[in-house]
């Protein structure tokens, strides 16, 4: 029997909150809050999560707010989280994205075939 305390994720994670610009064929570009990033994926807060297996372009904002790193990712999971803090019971939902590949130039536009 597997140890319940073992984290099944092999990649180390950085628990940092930052903004990302997400674009897909289904929706226009929208800014979202991302957190818990690794070399293979990350969690992105979304009030209305994109469908599973949707390919997206992720642009990470630099310190001045302009996109600086660009990646193709796929919606791998949906999450609905409830937690309690000083304000009481709260909730958020979002998606787990798995990085497919990083684009070679900062802020570059993904070729249309990359999302299909």
Image: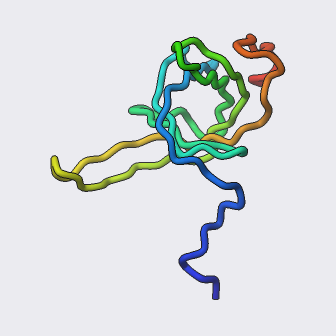
- Residue most extreme to the left: 87
Q: Residue at x 67, y 23 (%)?
A: 57
- Identify the image quadrant of the C terminus: top right
From this view, report whether residue 85 is shown above or below residue 33: below
Q: Is residue 91 left or right of residue 98?
A: left
**What x and y, as percent, mark residue 81?**
38, 52
Residue 28 in sight here = no
**What x and y, as percent, mark residue 95?**
52, 41
Q: Residue at x 72, y 45 (%)?
A: 40
- Identify the image quadrant of the N terminus: bottom right
**Location of residue 51 (image quadrant):** top right
Count of numbered marks: 0
Q: Is residue 78 left or right of residue 48?
A: right
**Location of residue 101 (image quadrant):** top right
Q: Residue at x 46, y 31 (%)?
A: 33
Residue 9 in sight here = yes
Q: Residue at x 61, y 24 (%)?
A: 60
**What x and y, as percent, mark residue 15?**
52, 47
**What x and y, as percent, mark residue 111?**
80, 13
- Residue most extreme to the front: 63
**Model colouring:** rainbow
- Residue most extreme to the bottom: 1
């Amino acid at each position: 029997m597997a140890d319940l305390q073992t984290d099944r994720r092999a990649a180390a994670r950085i628990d940092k909150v930052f903004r990302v610009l997400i674009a897909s064929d289904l929706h226009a570009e929208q800014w979202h809050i991302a957190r818990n990033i690794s070399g293979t994926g990350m969690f992105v807060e979304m009030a209305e999560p994109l469908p599973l297996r949707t390919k997206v372009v992720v642009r990470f904002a630099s310190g001045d707010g302009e996109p600086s790193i660009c990646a193709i990712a796929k919606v791998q999971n949906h999450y609905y989280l409830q937690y309690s803090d000083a304000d009481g019971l709260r909730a958020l939902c979002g998606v787990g994205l798995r990085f497919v590949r990083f684009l070679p130039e900062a802020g570059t536009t993904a070729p249309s075939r990359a999302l299909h």
